[in-house]
Amino acid sequence: AAEWRRGRRSTTPDVLARHGKDESYHPSVPPDVVAFPKSTADVSAVARLCHDRRVPLVPFGVGTSLEGHIQHPYGGVSLDLGSLDQMVSEFPDDMDCRAQAGMTRSAVNAALRHTGLEFTVDPGADATVGGMAACGASGTTAVRYGTMRDAVLGLTVVLADGSVIETGGRARKSSAGYDLTKLFVGSEGTLGIITEVALRLHPQPTAVAAATARFDDLDDAVAAVHAILLHGIPVARCELLDAPTLAAFNAYNKNDPAFRPQEVTPSLFLEFHGLSDAVLKEEADLALEACVDAGGRDVAWASDEAERHKLWAARHSTYYASCALKRDGKAIVTDACVPISKLAEVVRDTAADVEKMDVVGPIFGHAGDGNFHCILVYNDDDPPEYLERLHDVSARLIDRTLAAGGTCTGEHGVGSGKKKYVLRERGAAGVAAMAAVKHALDPQGIMNPGKVFDAPS
């Protein structure tokens, strides 16, 4: 605590504002002070200090969350974990590693390049592995490799009183007591602060190819996805983009001389990983045949590595491309996930709502696991009635998602933005059980209060 007071903190207004605002439309709600720990011991010392004084404590990675996770409605301390950015250990023979929580996804893979292994969860943003674990993140590769709940083998966690626990282990399975790792993955900093993450790794694929397929309507594109999955074809990425997304995509990337404009029609972006070119071609041909059978056309290959990277870099820009559809655009980001058999219906009805309500709302997502995003765009010049229509589209989307047996958030987490929907999705008894777990681990309620569910009065 003494070292923290001597300079490893900041109360500069710009720094405070930065640590109270993520990439969402939620306003900045800054902390009173930002602390910059350099080790788990530092995090423990700050947690003890906050616990003794009943001061709220909110962890911060790089601020790429999308649901107001890092807002400070009760003030307190933002704990910036950016200096915890080292690889702790590598175990190539066992295909796992341990990284500090502030290490970004790209930094982890750069450090692992010499091993021939990679960390496969790809949310698009270059988020920290601690933040990805805390939010239960996934992304474009989840259809093949799973989400952070599958990738995390164990954690180092600092609890509210400053005590440090280790969860999980390097064994691939265990029946030893409660699964505390799964408890903390997705807990959004409300139960403890993750300082190290043990990660499951995968071999870098020997052969990789990507393809695009065009469709005349969204229903046909989703039908193709359904067919690919039902046939057991191991697709590594399976992304759906509607026509407005492709229009935004083209406009946003038009100044890049290497970018090839995409046809403005519902499309699938696919990627395949194989042990050899021959195996990959066989699997990819089956997937593309399924696309054609569903009404797909103009199938185009991108087997060149540079071309593939450009394709996926452009895909990952779709959030920013959508926001750019309006001057100084901001967005309400939806994150619905439904059973695959319900995806076509929910996406179709959402697209109809966007058109009927006359709002800007491109739709894209990870169709291979039923997760899609409608990016509802606005700016400060829009009248209140427009914003009401946006929120109505969002509410109706979540209504039909829950009715279809889905979830209000597939990968972004709850934060402050989706609390009311968690109550509907999990029920009062379910939320009460979650609150009881939080009270047991954080009886003073200092850990990221007001997220996932309301803080007690």
Image (cartoon, rainbow, N blue to C red):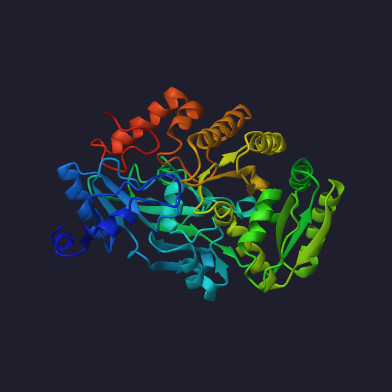
Depth check: give the residue in front, 359 or 404.
359
Residue 351, x across and y down, in percent: 67, 38
Q: Residue extending furthest right?
A: 293
Q: Is residue 347 above or below residue 314?
A: above
Q: Is residue 314 above or below residue 423?
A: below
Depth check: give the residue in front, 417 or 188.
417
**Quadrant housing the N terminus:** bottom left
Q: Is residue 250 above or below residue 360?
A: below
Is 85 displayed left or right of 357 in the figure?
Answer: left
Residue 101, x across and y down, in percent: 38, 59
Where, by quadrant of the figure, is residue 311 drawn? bottom right
Depth check: give the residue in front, 231 or 310.
310
**Quadrant housing the C terminus:** top left
Marker count (numbered): 0
Q: At 69% from the left edge and 70% from the top edge, which residue is drawn?
A: 307
Q: Is residue 406 above or below residue 263?
A: above
Residue 425, x across and y down, in percent: 51, 29
Q: Residue 377: tell me if it is visible.
A: yes
Is 351 displayed left or right of 430 in the figure?
Answer: right
Q: Residue 241: tell me if it is visible.
A: no
Residue 171, x across and y down, in percent: 48, 55
Where, by quadrant of the figure, is residue 124 drawn? bottom right
Q: At 78% from the left edge and 65% from the top edge, which residue is drawn?
A: 301
Q: Residue extending furthest bottom?
A: 114
